[in-house]
Image (cartoon, rainbow, N blue to C red):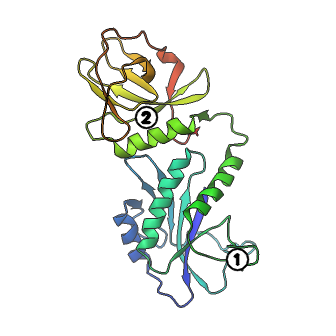
Amino acid sequence: MQRFELFVREGGEVPDLSEMAGTLVALGCWLRADGDYRPGTWHDAATGARAVIDLGVPPLEEDVQHPPRAYVDWTPLHLAVQVPLVCPHWMAVEAFQFLERLLATMPGAHALDTEDIQETPEAEPGPFAWSRPRALASWERLHAVQIASRTDLAHMGRGDSLRLWRWRREREAAWPPAAVLRDRAAAEAHAVCVWADPTTPCALPAIGLVLVQSEQPRLLRRGDLPAGLPLAHAGAALVPPPPLWPAGLPLERFAACDDELWID
């Protein structure tokens, strides 16, 4: 996880734990309801992005050998946001957008990447102005280390991954959601939508696979279907049923793939 800890300048206003909990819940987080330590999660229902929340001081014995790092002139808020490292890069971007919304509700608060604690080589360690490009560059470095020895991850091309992200963010509620399948034969990840009623046209993205729920389910490459009528957003097209359905791919070659088991 890429960990961001929140601080305010010494002497600045420090919201209490209940205030911060209320702010997090209003931003869509789930938190443990009470106590001095309220861990939780933020989850974006549309894209599937998530972050882990640490609010308060965990009930652990004091570690005198490794005390919490302190920074001159800064007061910790005991609030941290942790971003997954094994996932497509845009999930980190979504988490950064959540962190930016959180910072906007807390004037004077700064988020410090615990793996990037000096703004410049000459600067004293400690918080500095937020920069999403810098946070993403740090994430990319940490991500590369995390995946270097992993052999269990599927891969999706960056372009297809970005189009999947757009589909999840912009699709209309009546359009099919997009999950991901792993091709066991090639360790590839593919977006997949379900065509629930193959007797009627279906809005689909321009990428990935389509599971057609016919009497005999078929898994088809999107490119094997008609291009369809382009729609106004999400990169969608309204695709008519073809006169003759292609034979399709062997279903047993594919398996559901969690978003933290594939990379781009």
Image vertical order of residue 163 relative to residue 136, above or below: above
**Label total for image:** 2
Q: Dot 2, how many residues are within 10 Å of its Cα: few (below 14), some (14-19), or many (20+)?
A: some
SS for dot 1: loop
The residue singled out by tag 2 in the image is 179
Q: How far apart are marks 1 and 2 (CA)?
A: 42 Å
Give x and y (percent) for residue 73: 63, 87
Instruction: Give the residue at x 32% y 19%.
Output: 213
Res 133 → quadrant: bottom right
Of label 1 and label 2, which has the lower sequence position? Answer: 1
Residue carrying label 1: 125
Residue at position x 50%, y 88% in the image:
12
Q: Which of 39 and 102 is in front in this view?
A: 102
Spot occupied by residue 150 in the image (x, y as percentages of width and height): 69, 38
Amino acid type of disc 1?
A: Pro
Q: In which quarter of the image is the N terminus?
A: bottom right
Observer able to see residue 130: yes
Q: At 51% across and 22% down in the image, what residue appears?
A: 254
Q: What residue lies at 68% left-to-right and 34% top-to-bottom?
A: 151
Query: In the picture provided, is 2 more to the left or to the right than 251?
Result: right
Compared to residue 214, the image places residue 136 above or below, namely: below
| Residue 141 marker | none
In the figure, 221 relative to 118: above or below? above
At label 1, counting other C-alpha atoms closer than 10 Å, the crowd grade (few under 14, some 14-19, many 20 or more) is some
The residue type indicated by label 2 comes to Ala
